[in-house]
Image: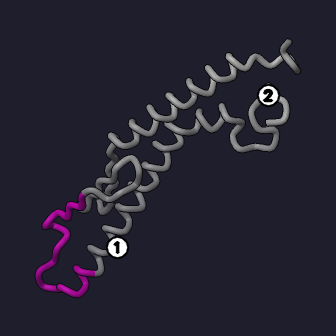
Amino acid sequence: MNPGGMDMQALLQQAQQMQQQLAQAQQALEEAEVEGTSGGGLVKVKLSGRGQVEDITVDPKAVDPTDAEETAQTVADLVLAAIRDAEAQVERLQQEKMGPLAEGLGGGMPGGMPGLPGF
């Protein structure tokens, strides 16, 4: 007899499938790389799909040798802007890869997993 009409085998298969999809999404994020820019491309920042800074490139044109103090502040501002740009791209990428999985789990919303009583 099957209490409540739940098919435990189907439930286990669905859970395994979701686990595989999650692992694939995490792997895709590990391998992904995004680039943020600022100052019309004077500063470029590369981040992993997990949001870790991998590389920062500053074009020599961003440096004014006659005003080191002003240049230092400008470059700092450009680096920060490029990092924020890249972080926004990472967030979009993560939502693209992980969002459907969260929806499959009920999106963390009250009511839990759709179609499963008590979840």
As displayed, is residue 117 above or below residue 63? Answer: above
Placement of the C terminus among the 4 image quadrants: top right
Q: Amino acid at mark 1?
A: Asp
- Residue that badge 1 annotates: 77
Residue at x 87%, y 19% (from the top left corner): 3
Placement of the N terminus among the 4 image quadrants: top right
- Residue that badge 2 annotates: 116
Query: Is residue 46 rendered to the left or right of residue 29?
Result: left
Asked whether the residues under the numbered discs 2 and 1 touch, taking CB atoms below 8 Å apart as contact, a structural biologist would say no
**59 within the magenta span:** yes
Identify the secondary structure beneath mark 2.
loop
Residues rendered magenta in the picture: 55-72
Residue 93 position in % (x across, y down): 46, 42
Q: Quadrant of residue 9?
A: top right
Q: Quadrant of residue 110?
A: top right
**Residue 4 or 64: which is nearer the viewer?**
4
Residue at x 15%, y 67% (from the top left corner): 61
Residue at x 46%, y 53% (from the top left corner): 88
Q: Earlier in the sequence, mark 2 or mark 1?
A: 1
**Residue 108 or 10: which is nearer the viewer?**
10
As displayed, is residue 106 above or below residue 65? Answer: above
Q: Amino acid at mark 2?
A: Leu
Residue at x 30%, y 63% (from the top left corner): 39
Query: Is residue 20 rendered to the left or right of residue 34?
Result: right
